[in-house]
């Protein structure tokens, strides 16, 4: 019997492993391939500076980012559940990876990434992809903006040209280190970083229609159109690297700090492994897996809204992310997930299938094999400027301005998650955010449960109508009912037509109410009980406790039963 068949016999319906590539290749033709080829090359050019910048900011060598973009990027496209999603190292992981490297070392980062990949694959296999959608948007916005702040803060070292011996991972420690080394300020590095930021902002606007009063002949020229298609990060990287080399500016470069990038294929390496180390990696593993799942599925949803292609399959996407994160670390890679900026670039370049993402990975590989020696000249302040621009675009800053329009619950969760992400870490922020969301949800649901009295002719009969969901957060309203009855009441009728659902705590509250009423010689009658509460009563064999004759189909019958009880 197969493993899948064994799980099915246990009642577990596993997700099928079927990459979107298999469906998209049906009817695939030369025209679509050329479109995907162009899109893949465009994304590859965009990904080159970002992959290096993300790796350096994460505390690892630049080639780790490139190898991740190549290997994980290829696997995510080839095996994923989205037609256009691009995978690779992501800005959201910078803070997490840097913290893990700081506390556990690079070897344990690789092990934690592999374990997170296994967890991601299991999440997809057991169809847990849909659960990621249940994370409140206030938590997602809070930690996303918090990560953006931390990414920006981590780049001020290179932007200002500072050279501390050690850069802490925490917010307060980074502020202290930057302040302590402010005397090392390098105006050349700062100028390059600011020029990088300004250029990234200005480049796409130079070519937008009507932005500048340019002659029609120039706008229609082929060279102008080709320049307009050049991705801004690549233009900035090439232009400012050339400027730095020509002027021999005294700034840190990839060559001066890392010695360059190897001009070779990544080789397989088994990281040092110990069970004692694995036990310490539980929290980092959960953090990588959770953040990877959230980012990849959010990115896929963004892509779905930008295209008319079939919507992504979340479980397949998680399994592909899992495979990519299990494989990439053995070749020096770091955690990978879906990347919104590169995915949007892929969509806008006209991608029609995962082939574009696979081309993007192969294009990066070709660049590494051909042009790796040139990377030694790339200035770190330029990469810092690129990452500051990424951080700005990553954050949803307008949401802070809209907080006044939302309720107290939304504001508390968003601001709380944001501050906890910045001051403590993402894991604490998400945990506290989810706890707060659950507490507020329980409170809100408890307020929706109501008990309303209905007027009847007989003063010895009290009728109440139940609304909403009777669960553990609302049982107090039922438990207090026995003490709120009018004097002389001998029968209580609960009309439950609008009672949607009852959990075991709610059922226990009804039983406690019956016992409290019995001590006062008052009978309890239920009527119009919906299928779910009635099913729970029967499954727990409490129909005898309540009395079969006292659980009736409608209110008139219940009132008739009440008169019979009064005559006994």
Image: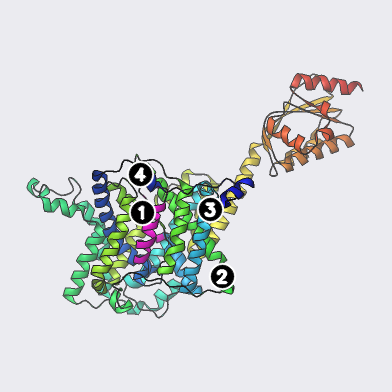
How many C-alpha atoms fall within 10 Å of the one at disc 4: few (<14), some, or many (≥20)?
some
Q: Does the magenta-highlighted stretch encompass residue 223? A: no
Residue placed under numbered mark 3 in the picture:
123
Name the foreground residue: 12 vs 498: 12
The quadrant in which residue 370 appears is: bottom left
Residue 289 seen anywhere in this rendered image of the structure? yes
Mark with earlier residue (2, 3): 3
Q: Quadrant of the C terminus?
A: top right
Look at the picture and state if 429 lies above or below 508: below
Q: Which residue sits furthest front? A: 1
Q: Which residue sits furthest bottom? A: 165
Q: Are marks 4 and 2 in contact (CB under 8 Å)?
A: no
Direction from residue 441 to residue 76 in the image, left or right: left
- Label 2 SS: helix
Residue at image x 34%, y 79%? 183
Residue placed under numbered mark 2 in the picture:
278
Mark with earlier residue (1, 4): 4
Q: Closer to us: mark 4 or mark 3?
A: 4
Name the foreground residue: 251 vs 444: 251
Mark with earlier residue (4, 2): 4
Residue 136 spot, x, y in % from top left: 52, 48
Residue at image x 25%, y 55%? 42
Residue placed under numbered mark 4 in the picture:
24
C-alpha span from label 1 to label 3: 20 Å
Mark with earlier residue (1, 2): 1
C-alpha span from label 4 to label 3: 24 Å
Residue placed under numbered mark 1 in the picture:
86
Q: Closer to us: mark 1 or mark 4?
A: 4
- The magenta segment is 66-91
């Amino acid at each position: 019997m197969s493993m899948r068949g064994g799980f099915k016999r246990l009642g577990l319906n596993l997700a099928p492993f079927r990459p979107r590539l298999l469906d998209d290749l049906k009817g695939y033709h030369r025209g679509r391939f050329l479109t995907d080829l162009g899109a893949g090359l465009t994304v590859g050019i965009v990904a080159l500076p970002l992959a290096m910048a993300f790796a350096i900011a994460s505390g690892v060598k630049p080639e780790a980012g490139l190898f991740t973009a190549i290997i994980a990027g290829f696997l995510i496209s080839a095996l994923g559940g989205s037609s256009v999603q691009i995978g690779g190292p992501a800005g959201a992981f910078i803070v997490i990876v840097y913290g893990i490297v700081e506390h556990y070392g690079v070897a344990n980062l690789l092990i934690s990434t592999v374990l997170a990949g296994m967890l991601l694959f299991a999440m997809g296999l057991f169809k847990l992809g849909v659960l990621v959608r249940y994370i409140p948007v206030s938590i997602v916005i809070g930690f996303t903006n918090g990560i953006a702040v931390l990414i920006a803060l981590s780049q001020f070292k290179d932007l200002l040209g500072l050279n501390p011996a050690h850069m802490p991972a925490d917010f307060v420690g980074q502020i202290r280190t930057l302040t302590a080394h402010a005397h090392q300020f390098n105006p050349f590095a700062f100028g390059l970083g600011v020029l990088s930021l300004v250029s990234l902002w200005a480049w796409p606007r130079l070519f937008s229609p009507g932005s500048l009063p340019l002659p029609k002949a120039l706008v229609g020229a082929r060279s102008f159109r080709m320049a307009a298609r050049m991705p801004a990060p690549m233009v900035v990287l090439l232009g400012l690297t050339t400027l730095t080399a020509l002027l021999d500016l005294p700034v840190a470069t990839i060559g001066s700090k890392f010695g360059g990038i190897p001009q070779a294929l990544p080789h397989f390496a088994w990281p040092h492994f110990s069970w004692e180390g694995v036990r310490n990696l539980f929290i980092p593993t959960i953090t990588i897996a959770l953040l990877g799942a959230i980012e990849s599925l959010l990115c896929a949803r963004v892509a779905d809204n930008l295209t008319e292609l079939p919507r992504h399959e979340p479980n397949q996407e998680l399994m592909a992310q899992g495979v990519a994160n299990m494989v990439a670390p053995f070749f020096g890679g770091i955690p990978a997930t879906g990347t919104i900026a590169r995915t949007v670039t892929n969509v806008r370049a006209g991608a029609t299938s995962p082939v574009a993402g696979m081309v993007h990975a192969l294009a990066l590989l070709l660049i590494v094999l051909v042009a790796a020696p040139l990377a030694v000249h790339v200035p770190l302040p330029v990469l810092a400027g690129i990452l500051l621009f990424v951080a700005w675009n990553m954050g949803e800053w307008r949401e802070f301005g809209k907080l006044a329009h939302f309720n107290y619950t939304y504001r508390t969760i968003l601001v709380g998650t944001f501050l906890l992400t910045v001051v403590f870490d993402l894991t604490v922020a998400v945990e506290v955010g989810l706890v707060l969301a659950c507490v507020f949800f329980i409170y809100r649901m408890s307020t929706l449960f109501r008990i309303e009295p209905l007027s009847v002719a007989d003063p010895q009969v009290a009728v109440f109508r139940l609304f909403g969901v009777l669960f553990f957060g609302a049982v107090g309203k039922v438990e207090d009912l026995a003490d709120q009855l009018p004097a002389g009441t001998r029968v209580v009728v609960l009309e439950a037509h609008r009672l949607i659902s009852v959990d075991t705590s709610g059922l226990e509250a009804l039983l406690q109410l019956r016992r409290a009423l019995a001590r006062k010689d008052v009978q309890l009658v239920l009527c119009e009980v919906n299928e779910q509460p009635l099913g729970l009563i029967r499954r727990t064999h409490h129909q005898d406790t309540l009395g079969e004759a006292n659980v009736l189909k409608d209110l008139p019958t219940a009132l008739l039963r009440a008169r019979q009880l009064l005559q006994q």
